[in-house]
Amino acid sequence: MTTYVSVEGIARRYGPTTIFEDVWFGVARGEFVCLVGHSGCGKTTILNILAGLETPDEGAVIVDGTEISGPSLDRAVIFQGHALMPWMTAAGNVAFALSCRHRDWSRGKCDAAAREALRRVGLTHAADRKPAELSGGMKQRVGIARALALNPKMLLMDEPFSALDALTRGSLQDEVARLVTETQQTAFMITHDVDEAILLADRILLMSNGPGARIAEVVVNTLPKPRTRATLHHMPGYHALRDHVLDFLITRSKAFDAKAPPPGWSPRGVPEVTPAVAEPPPLAAE
Ligand SMILES: Nc1ncnc2c1ncn2[C@@H]1O[C@H](COP(=O)(O)OP(=O)(O)O)[C@@H](O)[C@H]1O
Ligand SMILES: [Mg+2]
């Protein structure tokens, strides 16, 4: 797999406080990477840096061979809130984004593509409604349709489902899992929800607690795709993977110390673990 994004030693500091530093990772083309860690460790800051909305205090982010210097429609963001324009219909919101991306497209072409994008997320019937006439889940669906319609080289998502009720969250997670698998969309997502990370991610980056947060571990998710929430917990290896990530959040995220790191860890050589395919214990000698 070829690297699409290369994050090279980025840091964020506020005065004497280092939020995170020496953060290195890559995202390959077609790969889905999730970032998991406790509140305040700097996840949103890292996503904003990838989006080009903030610049790091140290280090750089290289996208497709070029250091990023600002936002780009190649990297579409799905925010936690839906961020729709209230005076435009659902179709209007998506069509507006499309008209920004494709300056040469006619209104009719943007409108048709917007309606197709809404159809893909099950919102055909709501295309002509304004955000105030949509439920929270429907608004977030419009946000997803808008981001996917842009056909971005990378999709960036900051806890996109966290404001939704559990049922809506579940069905949207399944839909996003299906859409990104179908389109091999390169994606980077922040989540607090371990099952969501396991459903969607090819690799899960585990960030230690701040201040001075780092990428402490990288978990490789080898569970077969397509995955759905209904089948996930029956997959062999699922429980090992889930326990590994939960143990990190509960225990190892606090204990990680970059000055006295665990064996084999360096910022550029974060160990990749694959709990799902752990070897069975060796048979006792006869
Ligand atoms: N202007 C600021 N001055 C000092 N600290 C800040 C400022 N803005 C953000 N922070 C701190 O930066 C840290 C990282 O924030 P954020 O990226 O939003 O974390 P996360 O998304 O992981 O919860 C937080 O601990 C926050 O308190
Ligand atoms: Mg955040």
Image (cartoon, rainbow, N blue to C red):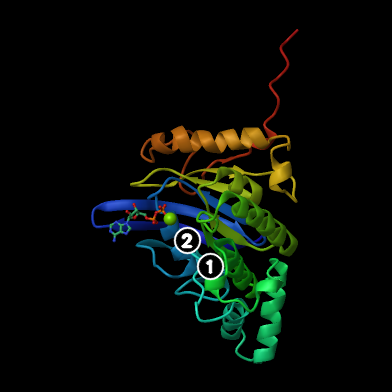
Circle 2: residue type = Leu
Discs 2/1, front: 1
State the quadrant of the C terminus.
top right
Circle 1: residue type = Val
Work out whether mark 2 precedes mark 1 in sequence or the reverse, and give the earlier one: 2
Image x and y of residue 2, in percent: 65, 61
Between 130 and 102, which is closer to the camera in this rendering? 130
The circle drawn on residue 47 is 2
Decide if residue 251 is on the left or right side of residue 177. left
Residue extending furthest left? 16
Decide if residue 52 is on the left or right side of residue 147. left
State the quadrant of the N terminus.
bottom right
Q: Are marks 2 and 1 in contact (CB under 8 Å)?
A: yes
State whether residue 168 appears in this view. yes
Residue extending furthest top? 286
Image x and y of residue 90, in percent: 60, 76
Q: Secondary structure at mark 2?
A: helix
Between 86 and 114, which is closer to the camera in this rendering? 86
The circle drawn on residue 29 is none
Ligand 1 is found in the corner quadrant, namely bottom left
Q: Which quadrant would residue 179 be assigned to in this image?
A: bottom right
Q: Which quadrant would residue 181 be assigned to in this image?
A: bottom right
Packing grade of label 2 (10 A; few <14, some 14-19, many >=20) is: many
Between 71 and 250, which is closer to the camera in this rendering? 250
Q: Is mark 2 within 8 Å of ligand 2?
A: yes
Q: Is residue 282 above or below residue 167?
A: above
How far apart are the alpha carbons under marks 2 and 1? 9 Å
The circle drawn on residue 77 is 1
